[in-house]
Amino acid sequence: MKRIAGFALAIAASCAWPAASAFAAEYVAMPGGMFESVLPQGPVPTLSTPVEVPPFSMRVTPVTVGEFEAFLRSQPQWQKGRVARVLAERRYLAAWSGASEAGPSIRENSPVTDVSWFAARAYCESEGGRLPTWLEWEYAAAADATRTDARKDPAWRRRILSWYERPAASSLDAVGGEANAYGVRDMHGLVWEWVDDFNALFIAGDSRTQGDPDLLKFCGAGAINIIDKDSYAIVMRIALLSSLNAADTTQSLGFRCAH
């Protein structure tokens, strides 16, 4: 089970976050609707129950390096070397050359990575938004270029999995890949992404825990038994997110915002 350690301290240390949007960003309206997650949403932890996803808006692309630089200039408490350790581990913005400058070796239009959940959440609030929930992210990520739910298509699944088979690149490509049916880009193939409720995602690999009521007791509503184990790419994302703490960072983990 993962808890957001030091959450109260985080709010105090990060100062006030503006309610109004600080930077222009493109969002698309997501219609919402009934959706069957790979994670159980009903009362029985081994059965999948379609749930209603309320309408929301999602950022078209992940937040870029250039956008995060602008955020750091306006909110210096999140700069490299100044952020409180409880809010971001020592690897926060590790490859950046300065406190608020990524440096010439990092492309400004590539997605920002090495950012903690706390920093990602603060950025989204500065934009008048929030991090998407896992269900919202999964709902948007289920679409391909023409279908709002392509998850049963083996060819679509293979295409996504091909990203995981490629060696990690030394530098990330620019955002702005092919749009899916909703108009959202780069849901797959570029970076992993933080979600607001990452700490509620829990994977039990031991079959003896399947349906164990104590698992639900200790992990609350986030005690998870994966329903659709063929959705390997999505399961891998859940596995990564469920292994993290809020201050953690990785060089392949970025984020986008929602409303």
Image: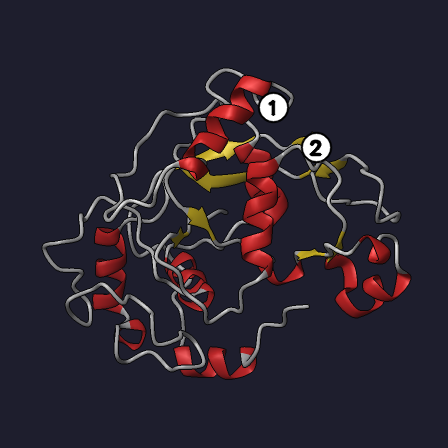
- Indicate the amino acid at tag 2: Phe
At label 2, counting other C-alpha atoms closer than 10 Å, the crowd grade (few under 14, some 14-19, many 20 or more) is some
Q: Is residue 227 left or right of residue 131?
A: right
Q: Position of residue 177 (x, y in %)?
A: 33, 29
Q: Which mark is residue 35?
A: 2
Mark with earlier residue (2, 1):
2
Residue 85, quarter of the rendered image: bottom left
**In the rendered image, the vertical position of residue 172 relative to residue 75, given as above or below:** above
Residue 85 visible within the image: yes
Identify the secondary structure beneath mark 1: loop
Q: Position of residue 250 (x, y in %)?
A: 39, 60
20 or 232: nearer the viewer: 232
Q: CA distance from mark 2 to mark 1?
A: 9 Å
Residue to which mark 1 is pinned:
149
As shown in the figure, which amino acid type bears the numbered disc 1? Asp
Asked if labels 1 and 2 touch by Cβ distance under 8 angstroms, the answer is yes
Which residue does the image show at 75% across and 39% down from the upper left?
Answer: 227
